[in-house]
Image (spheres, rainbow, N blue to C red):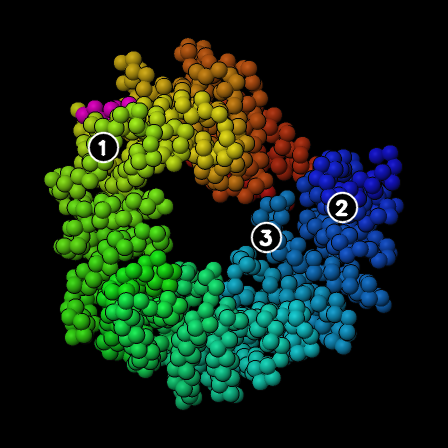
């Protein structure tokens, strides 16, 4: 840099330029400041002399990167720390972003040096000095330092292993955090009358950060709304038992506006979640609870601040915390409970009425009520809970509010009925309220539902009806059905007779079953395209799912009372008859819905649940409807099979049908059930080549492959797989080859075809076990080889397109998966191929290698599924076919082994374990055949020796990478990584001693002696062999070594 002015101009461009090329150029020119440690003094010069905020920002952010990424000497870090404190105190006003960056730097230096020197720990005292200055600017800087310090200590950093982070955080928690919390409370008291909100905001935010600290290292997910009790240390007890602590936050809520009032409530939410054992005794805890109840009661009486949405939401969370942390028996005994519960009930009812405004907050309130209700049976003593009075009103209020919301109308993109899973989560708490006084709740639901059901039934008989009016009726029915489904989901609640509850379950279920008789009749049978009708049918499917779990099949208790009552009402006297109703509805949906993917998928998932249950599956086979489906699964009967958009659903459909077919041990039944698919095969096989590229063939082929994949997924035993294999091979295999050859350039066809193949060759549950005299395993691999070679040779000759993943990479990764599964399936003796001069194996490996080499490594690592398939393939290759790898040319060999090193460095432990296994196989081969062997004689060993001679750094580099991962990162697969580390270490003692010297050189000099001892212990009692006992010894030593090395 020739001059400061030039630098300032570059910084201006870096942070302000609209032109990305200009920004990139500036970034490149200024990179040295953050990468090269020699530039640290220049950063200080910039801070002292530059005038523009952007150049100050560059200096500060560069120093931050240096401190995080490099091991700087202790004296230098102390100098930076002292310089920053002085700079912040004397420099005068700076722009907010520069200030924030400098304070972050100060806190990072403090955290990283926490155990290196006691002076780093004096930062709280330094911040307090800022607070005692007269000027507001200094006061603000002091609060900002403390805010940032607590955040920094609570957040893991990339430059610090997580074990070190926890040690620093725990030490900080024990030494400084309580003092900082007290400072925040003192500041809040002092600033109460201060109108400048900025300082109040900082003091509140500091309290919240202290209370949100990760006290016990459980790393709470801050984005989630819920957290458990807060494990505040016992030393904080006097401050928390002091009433002024709670009161200051209630006061701040009263005197400030959002966002400060919301932060005050957030602090109260945290305080309401403090662990029980913190308090001296129950009396102290009751006093704390009474204070919380009084404070929340006053807010309800005045309604202050609740018109603000953020405050309102946070206040509902605060009420919700009563559910988590306090028992009903404790609440009831607090003076003023009756006023409090009445106000909470009125607040809940009001919230339900203004549903759309409060929708996300209401669930906290319902959660509180459901917890209170479930505690009633355990309530002892005389004090009345008053729940009998309020809960029925809330139950009715909830249902009324849902109806009103339907009447008001949602715009289609935000209707809660659309997201069934989310809706059922939201309805989790509500059934407890219904079952609390089940008799009155269920009659209320029935009385509400009957007139709606009546008018819905009448409209079925009309020729035409008002669509909007019908949509509203269907939406109301959907809500009621979802509510009944949610009630059935929790089965019975304690405290009242099971039999009476079952009778009421039957009453409610009967109304839904009556509705089902109507939904597909008359006028309604023409409305499958309407969204409201689809929502109703999905609600009915949800009802069936919950009803089945409680009352049909495997887990269910065959309840006499429920079926006795259903028999009286509808003539359904046992669960077989009820299953018939469910299956009829499934069949109707599959016949009538062609457009709606959601309904089809939901119906199929219910169908699969029934078929895959052991008992329900057996029962299904007795039903005529099921016999019909299994025999006639054609597009004439189920038009959704015709619909291309639903073609993914076909796999699930045929998976279910496969379950049902294979449940009976009957080859005859299998053949007759496969007749519809056989017709498709025959039609396609007789299509001449000239006609094979038509749309009709395309869609028939896609459908057939998806169907076959479903059937293949359902084969879980040697017997069932054998039926499918004999049906397909050899007669129909040529069609697969023809399909892949004609349609290589159309992923819509090749993807389902290859995915079927990947399923077909997967040896799950040992289903691919052929007789010892059977050549089927070898014949199957030949087919695999033909398909892969046909696809690979053609796809490689096609030009690249914009969506290269969809066009090429997806097919390639599925091919690699097919090959990996076939190679690792243990049903082919691969030695046979070379013995008899059959090129099936070598051709498949050649083309697979060409396909992988055609993809840049950066792309392989960028697409998750491709990454997984690639490394799984390499693992199989190195474990079973290492000769193939070693016979490659040196460049290709180096590329493959280099990619293993990239995989080791990746974040996915599964992949790094696969790479470790591949490296271990390679190193073990070298050790056994070259290090320990005589002069290498086999051509393969000679090749490997040549590769390594051409690139002597290969093994040392990989070993260095492995050591760095184990020592400096948090790896969850240390056992897997230890295996190649031993193999590489014993190949050559020179490699290990060089690496040891390198690692020691990167550490501070005063640590060298201790670390050298650690290295000596690592190889203690480890011999120069790869037997399993020696490997286990090394793995144990490595665990100790890692622990001792990382202790600072």
10 Å crowding of disc 1: few (<14), some (14-19), many (20+): few
Label 1 vs label 3, nearer the camera: 1
Q: Where is residue 787 in the image (x, y as percent from the top left)?
A: 33, 26
Residue 623 sits inside the magenta stretch: no
Label 1 vs label 2, nearer the camera: 1
Q: Position of residue 923 (x, y in %)?
A: 47, 24
Query: Relative to 856, does residue 929 appear above or below in the rendering?
Result: above
Could you tell me how far apart the alpha carbons at marks 1 and 2 are, in whole angstroms? 66 Å
Q: Where is residue 446 in the image (x, y as percent from the top left)?
A: 30, 77
SS at badge 2: helix
Q: Are marks 3 and 2 in contact (CB under 8 Å)?
A: no
Which residue appears farthest toward the bottom when viewing the image?
A: 382
Q: Do the residues labelled 1 and 2 touch (CB within 8 Å)?
A: no
10 Å crowding of disc 2: few (<14), some (14-19), many (20+): few
How many numbered callouts? Answer: 3
In the image, 168 versus 555, the foreground residue is 555
SS at badge 3: helix
Quadrant of res 1010: top right
Could you tell me how far apart the alpha carbons at marks 1 and 3 are, in whole angstroms? 67 Å
Could you tell me how far apart the alpha carbons at marks 3 and 2 are, in whole angstroms? 38 Å
Q: Mark 2 points at which residue?
A: 16
- Residue visible at 37% across and 66% down? 467
In the image, 29 versus 494, the foreground residue is 29
Query: Relative to 284, does residue 710 appear above or below in the rendering?
Result: above
Q: Position of residue 112 (x, y in %)?
A: 68, 48
Highlighted range, magenta: 774-782
Residue 166: numbered disc: 3
**In the displayed structure, does residue 336 sit left or right of residue 75?**
left
Q: Name the residue under label 1.
A: 683
Return the disc, 3 or 2, that comes first in the chain's sequence: 2
């Amino acid at each position: 840099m020739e001059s400061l002015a030039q630098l300032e101009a570059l910084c201006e461009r870096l942070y302000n330029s609209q032109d990305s090329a200009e920004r990139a150029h500036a970034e490149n020119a200024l990179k040295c400041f953050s990468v090269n440690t020699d530039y640290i003094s220049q950063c200080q010069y910039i801070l002292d002399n530059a005038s523009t905020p952007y150049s100050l920002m560059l200096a500060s952010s560069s120093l931050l990167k240096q401190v995080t990424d490099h091991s700087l000497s202790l004296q230098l870090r102390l100098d930076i720390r002292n310089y920053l404190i002085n700079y912040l105190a004397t420099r005068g006003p700076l722009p907010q972003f520069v200030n924030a960056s400098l304070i972050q730097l100060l806190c990072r230096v403090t955290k990283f040096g926490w155990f290196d020197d006691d002076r780093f720990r004096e930062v709280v005292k330094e911040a307090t000095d800022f607070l005692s200055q007269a000027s507001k600017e200094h006061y603000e800087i002091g609060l900002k330092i403390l805010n940032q310090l607590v955040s920094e200590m609570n957040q893991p950093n990339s430059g610090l292993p997580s074990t070190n982070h926890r040690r620093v955080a725990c030490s900080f928690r024990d030494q400084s955090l309580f003092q900082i919390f007290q400072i925040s409370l003192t500041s809040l008291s002092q600033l109460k009358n201060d109108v400048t909100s900025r300082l109040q905001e900082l003091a509140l935010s500091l309290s919240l950060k202290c209370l949100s600290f990760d006290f016990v290292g459980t790393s709470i997910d801050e984005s989630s709304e819920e957290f458990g009790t807060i494990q505040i240390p016992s030393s904080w007890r006097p401050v928390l038992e002091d009433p002024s602590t709670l009161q200051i936050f209630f006061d701040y809520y009263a005197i400030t506006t959002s966002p400060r009032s919301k932060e005050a409530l957030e602090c109260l939410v945290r305080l309401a979640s403090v662990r029980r054992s913190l308090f001296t005794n129950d009396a102290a805890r009751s006093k704390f609870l009474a204070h919380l109840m009084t404070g929340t009661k006053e807010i309800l009486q005045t309604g202050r601040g609740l018109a603000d949405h953020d405050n309102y939401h946070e206040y509902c969370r605060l009420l919700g915390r009563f559910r988590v942390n306090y028992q009903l028996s404790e609440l009831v005994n607090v003076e003023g409970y009756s006023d409090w519960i009445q106000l909470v009930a009125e607040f809940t009812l009001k919230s339900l009425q203004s549903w759309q405004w409060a929708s996300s907050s209401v669930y906290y309130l319902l959660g509180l009520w459901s917890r209170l209700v479930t505690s009633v049976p355990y309530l002892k003593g005389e004090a009345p809970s008053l729940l009998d009075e309020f809960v029925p009103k809330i139950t009715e209020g909830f249902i009324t509010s849902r109806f009103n919301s339907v009447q008001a109308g949602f715009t289609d993109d935000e209707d809660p009925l659309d997201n069934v899973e989310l809706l059922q989560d939201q309805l989790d708490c509500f059934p407890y309220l219904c079952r609390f006084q089940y008799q009155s709740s269920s009659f209320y639901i029935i009385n509400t539902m009957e007139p709606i059901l009546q008018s819905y039934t009448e409209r079925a008989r009309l020729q035409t009806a008002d669509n909007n009016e019908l949509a509203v009726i269907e939406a109301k029915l959907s809500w009621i059905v979802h509510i009944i489904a949610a009630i059935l989901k929790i089965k019975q609640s304690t405290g009242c007779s099971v039999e009476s509850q079952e009778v009421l379950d039957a009453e409610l279920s009967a109304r839904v079953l009556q509705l089902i008789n109507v939904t597909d009749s008359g006028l309604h049978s023409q409305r499958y395209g309407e969204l409201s009708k689809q929502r109703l049918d999905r609600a009915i499917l949800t009802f069936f799912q919950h009803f089945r779990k409680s009352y049909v099949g495997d887990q269910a208790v065959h309840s006499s009372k429920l079926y006795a009552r259903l028999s009286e009402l509808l003539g359904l006297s046992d669960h077989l008859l009820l299953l018939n109703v469910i299956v009829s509805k499934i069949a109707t949906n599959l016949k009538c819905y062609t457009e709606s993917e959601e309904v089809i998928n939901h119906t199929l998932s219910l169908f699969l649940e029934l078929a895959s249950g052991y008992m329900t599956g057996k029962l299904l086979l007795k039903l005529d409807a099921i016999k019909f489906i299994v025999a006639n699964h054609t597009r004439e009967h189920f038009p959704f099979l015709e619909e291309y958009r639903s073609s993914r659903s076909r796999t699930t459909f045929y998976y279910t049908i496969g379950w049902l077919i294979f449940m009976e041990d009957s080859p005859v039944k299998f053949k007759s059930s496969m007749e519809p698919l056989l017709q498709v095969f025959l039609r396609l096989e007789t299509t001449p080549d000239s006609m094979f590229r038509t749309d009709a063939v395309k869609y028939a082929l896609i459908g057939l492959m998806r169907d076959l994949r479903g059937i293949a997924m359902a084969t879980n035993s040697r017997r069932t797989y054998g039926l499918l294999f004999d049906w397909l091979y050899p007669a129909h295999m040529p069609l697969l080859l023809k399909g892949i050859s004609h349609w290589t350039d159309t992923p819509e066809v090749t993807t389902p075809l290859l995915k079927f193949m990947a399923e077909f060759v997967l040896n799950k549950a040992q289903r691919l076990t052929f007789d010892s005299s059977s050549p089927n395993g070898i014949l199957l691999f030949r087919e695999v080889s033909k398909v892969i070679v046909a696809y690979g040779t053609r796809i490689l000759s096609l030009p690249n397109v914009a969506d290269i993943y969809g066009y090429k990479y997806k097919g390639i990764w599925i091919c690699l998966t097919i090959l990996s599964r076939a190679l690792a399936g243990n049903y082919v003796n691969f030695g046979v191929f070379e013995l008899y001069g059959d090129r099936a194996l070598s051709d498949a490996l050649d083309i697979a290698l060409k396909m992988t080499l055609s993809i840049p490594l950066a792309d392989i690592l960028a697409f998750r599924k491709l990454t997984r398939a690639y490394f799984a393939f390499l693992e199989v290759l190195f474990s079973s076919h290492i000769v193939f790898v070693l016979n490659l040319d040196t460049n290709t060999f180096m590329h493959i082994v280099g990619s293993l090193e990239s995989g080791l460095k990746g974040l996915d432990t599964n992949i790094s374990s696969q790479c470790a296994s591949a490296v271990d196989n390679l190193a073990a081969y070298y050790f056994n055949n070259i290090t320990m062997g005589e002069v290498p004689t086999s051509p393969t060993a000679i090749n490997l020796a040549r590769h390594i001679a051409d690139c002597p750094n290969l093994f040392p580099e990989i070993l260095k990478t492995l050591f760095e991962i184990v020592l400096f990162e948090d790896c969850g697969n240390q056992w897997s990584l230890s295996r190649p580390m031993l193999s590489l270490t014993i190949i050559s003692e020179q490699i290990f001693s060089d690496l040891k010297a390198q690692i020691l050189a990167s550490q501070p000099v005063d640590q060298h002696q201790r670390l050298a001892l650690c290295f000596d212990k690592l190889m203690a009692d480890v011999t120069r062999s790869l037997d399993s006992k020696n490997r286990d010894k090394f793995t144990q030593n490595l665990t100790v070594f890692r622990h001792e090395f990382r202790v600072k």
